[in-house]
Amino acid sequence: MKKTILRELMWFIIASVLAVPLSFVFLGMLKLTSANPSLNEVEKVFTIQLFMIGWLVMFICVYIVRIVVKALLKLVGVHDATSGNP
């Protein structure tokens, strides 16, 4: 049980860290970023909100990819070496 909790905590941290640069890429691809350095207060708040939404979307995407890979490995029959089960 302790090993499972630590593994999930590790994946939470990894997903959080990976989501930061991926959110910049996500918003850049959608052209929702501004190259103009002079933004008023409303635009600054909106930009921060967009990056937070981008972070959340990418965080969820990292977890979805993890779940899909785990399911495919289970379907193929590859055993998880980290679970300790043969």
Image (tube, helix red, strand yellow):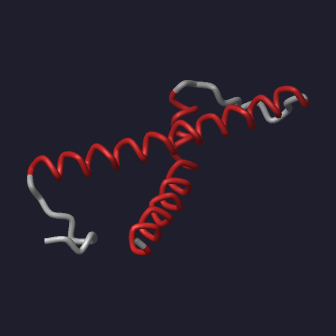
Q: Measuring from the top left, give residue 67's x and y in whole percent.
A: 33, 46
- Depth check: give the residue in front, 48 or 84: 84
- Taking the view exactly as shown, the residue that stands out farthest to the left is 77
Question: Which residue sits at x=63%, y=26%?
Answer: 32
Q: Horizontally, is 73 left or right of 76 in the view?
A: right
Q: Residue 79 appears at what percent x and percent y?
A: 15, 63
Residue drawn at point x = 53 percent, y = 61 percent: 13
As drawn, which residue projects farthest toward the right?
41
Q: In this orientation, which residue lies closer to the viewer: 36 or 19?
A: 19
Write down the quadrant of residue 40 in the picture: top right
Quadrant including the C terminus: bottom left
Looking at the picture, tell me which residue is in the foreground, 67 or 24.
67
Tell me where residue 24 sits by quadrant.
Answer: top right
> Up-down: is 78 above or below 84?
above
Q: Is residue 66 left or right of residue 61?
A: left
Please give left or right for residue 86 compared with residue 54 in the image: left
Q: Quadrant of the N terminus?
A: bottom left
Relative to 71, say whether 6 is above or below.
below
Q: Where is residue 3 shown, x and y percent of the image?
A: 39, 74
How many numbered badges does the structure rendering display?
A: 0
Residue 85 appears at what percent x and percent y? 19, 71
Q: Residue at x 58, y 32 (%)?
A: 27
Residue visible at 9% across and 50% down in the picture = 76
Q: Quadrant of residue 4?
A: bottom left
